[in-house]
Image: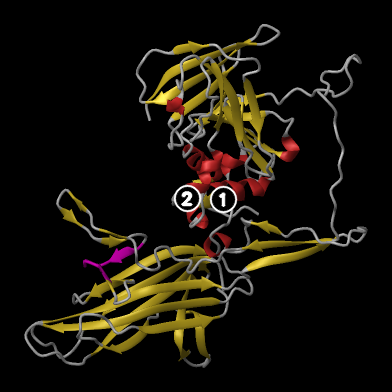
């Protein structure tokens, strides 16, 4: 939006300090108009809230011509921008005039007309959160606040760092999460979830968005630009002593203060939802597919998947609209693979599952039913020892070790040569695969290392028939490690005499545990992707 300054309201306090309210209209290009204001024209207010404390400004203008301010009545939430400046012409507050406002006595002017402007934080309830990717908490906050379209910096006082954080920078800048953890929420809800982690609040103060942890209200603040660049620090607020007038104190209340007590509770239920991922593999449903044509190089590929061999993977859809990856027969060994670092954790059983089908097509003859063979390989590379590389393979059918061992093994087995899980499926000639499910559930990983999932193309079909082509279709691949879906703890206050329980406490984001970065969507991470514990 392009705002033009239309009205400037000047107000001199009883101590001779000149404050200004500047009112700008979207699209206005005329000259600014100075306008007298009535007594006590500006009142800055802050909402009562736990985490997101919106602010608003009440102001009044003297209307000199009948219905002069009808243009303030609008249905657009950001049509009129309002800014409050201190005597040094430093911005104190910014916001937008609330829509659908205009009331004045039906008498001849001059009259006093009052308006209210708000900072736009409440409007974030109508803004869907669509950010994706690996982001810091500060980047996510900036994305949400940017929806207000107010270009303000940040003042942050949160002195709660993880072990590997740099204490000269805000933990919001150094704590990361995959943005998809907040899918389906509004920007307002995302802000609340992040602030809950630190028991902090956000509000507008002195021309910045101020984010303050409850325990750090008097601490030095770290300053960041509207885009998140570090700008230095500023001292915390002065400590003012509250007392009675005439006793040498700093401030005294206007009117009277009132004390009230709130009831406690006998117990509280604390819950944390781990928000378990469907699969630890990236793009496991094969939905993300790219057609790259750079300098005459045609390279279609599935995001996060590597290609082994020269072939063109294809994304198609089944009758329900779900995508699948199609790998053709080329006469050479080809595969799609994805490596991922995993940690061996006691009790975390391993599950591999994929929906798969085969397709046969012959342009020169009537369709026939053929059995198509294909292979899948899962390997776990764990370094080396005195015997050589430590590589385990996922074995789906029991294999017998040679004499003198003679053991029969299944699951994760260390072998000297690659092991392929082999399958045979009757091919569909309809153009769509008849999907079957392959699933292997086994014990926890034997060691930490690099897990590599290889989805191979079809084996050679014999005898060859002129004009035939055939494919393997992979769909909805799941690699999962068993973990609790969440934690629930009932805290009891044994000395409490209160008969009631406190409301449940919901913790929206989890700290790390074994493989947490892979298993949960809402795990806090360092910048290198390792979980914060």
Frontmost residue, 511 versus 33: 33
Local crowd at mark 2 within 10 Å, few (<14), some, or many (≥20)?
many
User: Between marks 1 and 2, how big is the CA–CA gap?
Assistant: 9 Å
Who's the residue at 83% across and 21% down the image? 252
Name the element at disc 1: helix
- Magenta segment boundaries in residue numbering: 305-316
Instruction: Name above or below for residue 211 compared with residue 190.
Output: above
Disc 2 on helix, strand or loop? loop
Residue displayed at 57% across by 51% down:
525
Residue placed farthest to the front in the image? 107
Does the stretch in magenta take in 50? no
Q: Is residue 126 visible?
A: yes
Query: In the rendering, at what x and y percent does residue 416 appear?
Result: 43, 78
User: Which quadrant of the figure has residue 338?
Assistant: bottom left
- On residue 315, which mark appears? none
Tag 2 or tag 1, which sits nearer the N-term?
A: 2
Query: Percent position (x, y) of residue 488?
Result: 71, 66
In the image, residue 52 sits, relative to residue 251, either above or below, namely below
In this rendering, position of residue 273 left or right of residue 69: right
Asked whether the viewer can see residue 169, the reply is no
Asked whether the beta carbons under mark 1 and mark 2 sit within 8 Å of each other, the answer is: yes
Which of these two is toward me, 334 or 56? 56
**Observer-nearest of 229 and 453:** 229
Query: How many discs appear?
Result: 2
On the image, numbered disc 2 is attached to which residue?
129
In what quadrant of the picture does the C terminus appear?
bottom right
**Residue that numbered label 1 is attached to:** 189
């Amino acid at each position: 939006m392009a705002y033009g300054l239309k009205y400037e309201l000047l107000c001199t306090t009883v101590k001779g300090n000149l404050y200004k309210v500047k009112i700008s209209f979207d699209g206005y290009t005329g000259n600014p108009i100075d306008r007298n204001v009535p007594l006590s024209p500006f009142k800055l207010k802050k909402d009562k809230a736990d985490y997101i404390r919106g602010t608003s400004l009440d102001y009044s203008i003297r209307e000199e011509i009948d219905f002069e301010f009808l243009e303030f009545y609008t249905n657009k939430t950001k049509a009129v921008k309002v800014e409050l400046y201190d005597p040094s012409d430093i911005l104190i507050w910014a916001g937008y005039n609330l829509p659908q406002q205009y009331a004045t006595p039906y008498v001849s002017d001059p009259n006093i007309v009052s308006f209210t402007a708000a900072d736009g934080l409440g409007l974030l309830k109508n803004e869907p959160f669509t950010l994706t990717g690996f982001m810091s908490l500060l980047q996510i906050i900036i994305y949400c606040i940017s929806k207000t379209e107010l270009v303000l910096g940040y003042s942050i006082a949160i002195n709660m760092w993880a072990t590997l954080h740099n204490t000269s920078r805000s933990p919001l800048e150094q704590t990361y999460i995959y943005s998809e953890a907040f899918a389906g929420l509004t920007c307002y809800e995302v802000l609340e979830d992040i602030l809950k982690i630190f028991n902090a609040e956000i509000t507008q103060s002195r021309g910045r968005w101020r984010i303050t942890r409850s325990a750090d209200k008097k601490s030095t603040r770290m300053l960041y630009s509207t885009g998140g660049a570090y700008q230095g620090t500023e001292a915390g607020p002065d400590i003012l002593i509250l007392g009675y007038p005439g006793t040498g104190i700093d401030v005294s209340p206007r009117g009277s203060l009132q004390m009230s007590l709130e009831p406690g509770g006998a117990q509280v239920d604390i819950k944390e939802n781990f928000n378990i991922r469907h699969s630890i593999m990236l793009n496991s449903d094969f939905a993300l597919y790219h057609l790259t044509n750079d300098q005459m190089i045609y390279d279609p590929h599935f995001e996060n998947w590597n290609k082994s061999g020269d072939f063109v993977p294809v994304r198609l859809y089944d009758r329900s609209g779900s995508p699948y990856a199609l790998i053709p027969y080329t006469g050479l060994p080809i595969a799609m693979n994805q490596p991922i670092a995993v940690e061996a954790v006691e009790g975390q059983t391993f599950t591999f599952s994929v929906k798969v089908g085969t397709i046969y097509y012959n342009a020169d003859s009537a369709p026939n039913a053929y059995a198509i063979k294909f292979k899948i390989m899962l390997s776990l590379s764990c370094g080396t020892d005195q015997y050589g590389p430590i590589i385990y393979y996922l074995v789906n059918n029991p294999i017998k070790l040679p004499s003198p061992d003679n053991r029969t093994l299944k699951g994760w087995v260390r072998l000297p040569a690659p092991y392929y899980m082999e399958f045979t499926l009757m091919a569909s000639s309809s153009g769509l695969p008849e999907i079957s499910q392959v699933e292997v559930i086994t014990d926890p990983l034997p060691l930490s290392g690099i897990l590599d999932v290889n989805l191979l193309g079809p084996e050679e079909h014999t005898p060859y028939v002129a004009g035939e082509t055939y494919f393997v279709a992979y769909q909805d691949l799941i690699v999962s490690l068993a973990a609790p879906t969440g934690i629930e703890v009932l805290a009891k206050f044994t000395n409490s005499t209160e008969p009631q329980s406190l409301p449940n406490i919901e913790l929206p984001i989890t700290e790390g545990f074994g493989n947490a970065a892979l298993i949960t969507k809402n795990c806090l991470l360092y910048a290198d992707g390792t979980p914060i514990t």
